[in-house]
Image: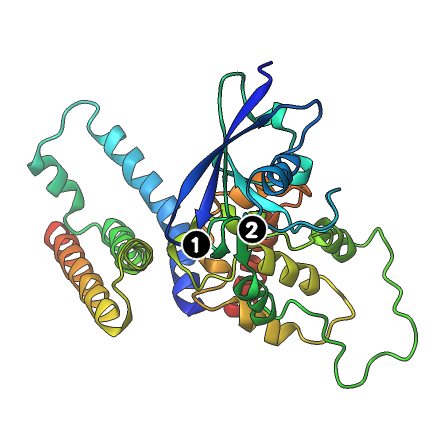
């Protein structure tokens, strides 16, 4: 079980950095107003952008389901394999939706 | 100060109700004095536990006006404002035996489960081990070693309430003192024991244990130490 704890803590480090960069970029980018077309013009073909948000999405897909699992275990009677399977599925959905969005704004 | 004190005392076990008593207020009266007076003068069927009366044994802990405390070291004047009543309940997160007495077996079983005992190894040292007071390990062990197992931290802990298998602050604090015992030879087993889903990782750092420990011990930091030790080992 420490594997989940270690995975959650490690991704927390990644997210602390990634969320800060993400928010700072938003605040900086929209100062003068920015259209969707402007944004896509900047992100298309930008490998740094794609890698950054790729890592972000993977970290979220690992971090969030583990936290949600802890919350559910503490606040509901739900335990066992069905809980783990449901949250693995949740992780897969987060990963698929996130990577789909990254690919969409990159390519 | 009013001459009389209204007291609501939990009667029963898991199911039960509060019973009201009125007793005289006295100078320097402790909460344990109040319970003892009720049992001796008003209702001899009231069950509670105490031994030393001076804050050494840890057996008189109860929930006093919603907070876990040693009743022998809690003066009524400090917890009951003028006009208010005193409310006494058994420690939270323990099975109630009767009235204010709780079952401690599971609490201490968790100390064992956390391997909260010294492991000398197959071939103990022949000579005395020299552990000087200024070493880092000795200081960390000293910070938590004065625990007398009263159960106040365990009663205060929300995680124990949510996750009944959680080992709890006292057992984990004891494990941490032993992790820092340079003579101990059972470290791998101990870190395994405290690294399960019922171990140190379940702690939310609410710090209720640290807030309420009557000895001023800070189990939250002991648990944080175990997390680091576990993380360091797991990452290798």
Q: Is residue B163 left or right of residue B171?
A: left
- Residue ID at (56%, 61%): B104
Quadrant of the image containing the N terminus of chain A: bottom left
State the separation of the CA atoms marked 2 and 1.
11 Å
Q: How many marks?
A: 2
Describe the element under mark 1 as helix, strand or loop.
loop
SS category of the residue bearing label 2:
loop
Q: Quadrant of residue A107?
A: bottom left
* Category of crowding for the residue at label 1, using alpha-carbon neighbours closer than 10 angstroms: few (below 14), some (14–19), many (at least 20): some
Residue beneath disc 2:
B47
Q: Label 2 is found on which chain of the structure?
A: B
Work out whether residue B200 or residue B110 is closer to the camera in this orientation and state it.
B110
Residue A103, image x, y percentages: 14, 56
Do the residues under discs 2 and 1 have CB atoms within 8 angstroms? no
Locate residue A85: give its quadrant.
bottom left
Label ID, residue B179? none
Q: Pointer 1 indicates a residue of which chain?
A: B
Residue B115, x across and y down, in percent: 62, 71
Image coords of residue B10 (percent x, y): 46, 43
Residue B44 or A80: which is nearer the viewer?
B44
Q: Disc 1 marks which residue?
A: B13
Let me know if residue B236 appears in the view: no
Q: Nearer the viewer, residue B146 or B183?
A: B146
């Amino acid at each position: 079980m420490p594997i989940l704890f270690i995975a959650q803590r490690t991704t927390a480090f990644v997210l602390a950095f990634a969320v800060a960069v993400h928010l700072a970029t938003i605040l900086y980018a929209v100062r003068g107003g920015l259209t969707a077309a402007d944004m896509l013009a900047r992100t298309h073909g930008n490998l740094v952008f794609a890698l950054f948000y790729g890592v972000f999405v993977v970290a979220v897909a690992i971090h969030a389901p583990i936290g949600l699992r802890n919350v559910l275990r503490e606040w509901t009677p739900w335990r066992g394999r069905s809980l783990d399977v449901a949250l693995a599925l949740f992780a897969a959905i987060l990963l698929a939706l996130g990577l789909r969005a990254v690919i969409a704004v990159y390519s | 100060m009013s001459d009389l004190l209204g007291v609501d005392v939990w009667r029963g076990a898991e199911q039960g109700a509060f019973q009201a008593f009125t007793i005289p207020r006295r100078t320097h009266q402790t909460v344990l004095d109040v319970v003892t007076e009720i049992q001796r003068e008003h209702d001899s069927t009231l069950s509670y536990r105490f031994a030393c009366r001076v804050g050494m044994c840890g057996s008189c802990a109860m929930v006093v006006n919603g907070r876990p405390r040693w009743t022998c070291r809690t003066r009524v004047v400090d917890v009951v404002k003028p006009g208010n009543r005193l409310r006494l309940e058994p420690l939270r997160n323990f099975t109630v035996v009767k009235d204010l007495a709780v079952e401690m077996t599971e609490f201490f079983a968790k100390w064992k489960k956390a391997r909260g005992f010294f492991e000398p190894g197959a071939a103990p040292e022949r000579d005395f081990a020299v552990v000087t007071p200024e070493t880092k390990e000795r200081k960390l062990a000293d910070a938590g070693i004065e625990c007398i197992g009263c159960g106040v931290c365990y009663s205060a802990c929300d995680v124990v309430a949510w996750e009944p298998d959680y080992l709890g602050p006292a057992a984990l604090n004891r494990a941490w003192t032993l992790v820092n015992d340079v003579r101990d030879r059972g470290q791998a087993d101990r870190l395994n024991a405290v690294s399960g889903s019922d171990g140190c990782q379940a702690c939310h750092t609410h710090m209720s244990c640290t807030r309420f420990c009557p000895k001023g011990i800070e189990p939250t930091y002991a648990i944080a130490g175990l997390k680091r030790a576990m993380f360091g080992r797991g990452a290798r």
